[in-house]
Amino acid sequence: MTLYQLRNLQHRYGERTVLDLSALDIAHGEIIALVGPSGSGKSTLLRLLQFLETPTQGSLLFDGILSDHALPLEARRRVVTVFQHPALLDRSVFDNVAYGLRLRGVPYGPETIMAALGRVGLRDYARVRAKTLSGGEAQRVALARALVLNPIALLLDEPTANLDPYNVGLIEEIIRGHGTTTVVLVTHNTFQAKRLADRVGLLLSGKLIELLPADRFFNAPLDPRTRSFINGEMVY
Amino acid sequence: MLPFRAHLGQTLIFSASGALLLFLVLPLFVLLARAIEADLLQQLTQPTVTQALRLSLVTSSLSMLITAALGTPLAYSLARHKVPARSVIETLLDLPIVLPPAVAGLALLLTFGRRGFLGPVLETLDLSLPFTTTAVIMAETFVAAPFFIRSAQVGFANVSHQLEESASDLGANNWQVFRRVTLPLAGTALLSGLILSWARALGEFGATILFAGSFSGRTQTMPLAIYHALESDLGSAVALAAILILISFFFLALLRLITHGRIGHPML
């Protein structure tokens, strides 16, 4: 089953084409990692998958529904992104995790929020003011805030950049326990992609060079550019 | 030599600052002292005073409401959307700030007057605007609205797009993003713009007297009433002036309190 189906998709900012994908399918429940240097279009792709922007050209099918020019709130509410720098409300950790549910007008009990906090190991932090958290804790709150919404897709934009190894380990463990949620992970850390993903794709200058199962991507890539990127030889 | 020259320099700075400060503040204190002497509270019961006070408060408040209701979308569009000829629009919006209010009054009269540009249209609608309370509100809005629009525009432009996007990402619809993120974050700028424009409306004189005239109880706001009272009853002029000073002082103090971050932001 395909969750996202992208065909002949182009996205431009003014004159500049930042994304040019002939085809990309993302399956239900898989973890797909997109690697590539900065400016290769990874984050732009996530913005399109989150429906924060509409592609300039081409089609984006989500769960069988075509995303047209009116950014569909219903579709957007089934997907959630965790950014590299989470924007937390200046309230308690509990309120932050409950925010998405409140925006949706969904009734919830404290146990729902506490369970989500439990998943990221922050059950004791419910009453703590979000502003006082460390970078790693803040990112875990952002993950709990995303997971509590039970999204069909979880989009992660460099979720562990600038975090210490302990927090990186914790966050990767949470991602591994994604269940049926589709995970799209954008990273320039190839090791992380190797540790987590079912399939890995390389983006260069807005183009998808290749997308392969993780072991093949790292052991037997077809494109020489993939090999040089993995070996850290890519000049950019 | 040097210490003496430094001493001299300091003395010059102090005396120049002191002289100007005295010049700016002394008249206000003299006026307040005279108001107390003339029994301010007793003057407050005079019908000319109460009428002018009520009219001023009602018209300036209505003008503020109109400015906020129509000015907020305009300021938001100017801050966020691609607006053709933006700099032309912004310059035109700033014009009422620097124009003598009498010019504004004349322009309003020529546009909305009985024989003005829109006169025939208004006549078919059986509307006569000049020399009515509505005209007072129009004159006040005309001169005061740009203060709000400019302040609000800066406020909206400064709201972090990242925070708005995070709210969208968490499932907020466009209205929720605006109400829960953009508006609170721009709130300080909106509020201070509102207070500034309201204070400007409260002090409006030139445009009002030309476009609305000075009819007691109908178009005679406090500044106009002061002007009129000077001819007959200095006591009520002083009382009205004192009230204006006190109200303005109160709101400027409030403004400082707000812009110094006493009213907090809900988001990081």
Image (cartoon, coloured by chain):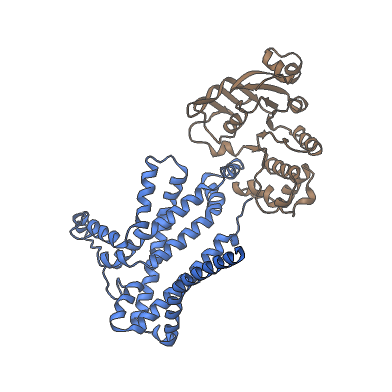
Chain colours: A brown, B blue
Residue for point 42% across, 64% down: B198
Residue B229 picture location, percent across and down = 31, 80
Q: Is residue B52 above or below residue A87?
A: below
**Where is residue A171, by image quadrant?**
top right
List x then y, in percent, for residue B42. Answer: 41, 87
The residue lying furthest to the front in this view is: B1
In the image, residue A63 sits, relative to residue B103, either above or below, namely above
Residue at coordinates 22% horizontally, 57% vertically from top-left? B110
Residue placed most toward the observer, A42 or A31: A42
Q: In this view, does A75 lie to the left or right of A83?
A: left
Q: Is residue A211 left or right of residue B195?
A: right
- Counting from the top left corner in percent of width and height, residue A162 is at 73, 37
Name the image quarter holding the N terminus of chain A. Answer: top right
Relative to A75, is A114 on the left or the right? right
Residue A2 % position (x, y)? 63, 24
The relative height of residue B111 versus residue B157 in the rendered view (above or below) is: below
Image label count: 0
Q: Which image quadrant: the C terminus of chain A? A: top right
